[in-house]
Amino acid sequence: MPPQHAPGFLNIVDDAKKRVRETNVDEVKARMDRGQKFVLIDVREESEFAKDHLPGAIHLSKGVIERDIESRVPDPATPVVLYCGGGFRSALAADNLQKMGYRNVLSMDGGIRGWRQKGFPLARD
């Protein structure tokens, strides 16, 4: 069951979602199956990532992504897909990356919970 979020948090997520482009679990899986090139970033906490994550994902938590993105993804034109638990933190992170000049950023609505519900594969490093 998804967590209950505070109204203030939901307000800033709704505001960010007005500016970011979203994708969904099925689209991301289809891109992976087609071998499309993009950087998949898990913005959840380190403990969440360690439990499981999407295959091929790198970890840059929402707390550090703005600080570290330029060293991990130096070209702001690189296609990037962000995901979290359900699509809220990834929307906030996508909004900030766009403000930093990243032009090809998507937030995966549904997050890893949606991925799990579909029975898609997960990785554990």
Image (cartoon, rainbow, N blue to C red):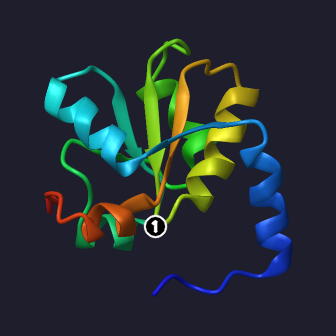
Tell me the residue at 17%/25% (across/down): 34
**111 above or below 69?**
below
For this rendering, which residue is in front, 81 or 109?
109
**Residue 17, percent across and down?**
72, 47
* Left-right relation of 83 to 87: left
- Residue 122 is situated, as x and y percent measured from the top left of the image, at 17, 60
Q: Residue at x 37, y 64 (%)?
A: 114
- Quadrant of image for the N terminus: bottom left
Q: Residues within 10 Å of mark 1 (few under 14, many from 20)?
A: many
**Image point (24%, 35%), residue name:** 30
Note whether 29 is above or below 5 in the view shown: above
In this rendering, the answer to whether 82 lies above or below 4 is above
Q: How many marks?
A: 1
Left or right of residue 91, residue 123 in this image: left
Measured as percent of width and height from the top left, residue 36 is found at 25, 21
Query: Left or right of 53: which side holds 68?
Result: right
What type is the residue that disc 1 sits on?
Answer: Gly
Seen at 54% across and 58% down, the residue is: 87
Q: Is residue 68 left or right of residue 15?
A: left
Callout 1: SS: loop
The residue to which callout 1 is attached is 85
Percent across and percent down for residue 59 are 37, 50
Instruction: Assign the C terminus to one quadrant of the image.
Output: bottom left
Among the 4 quarters of the image, the one containing residue 6: bottom right
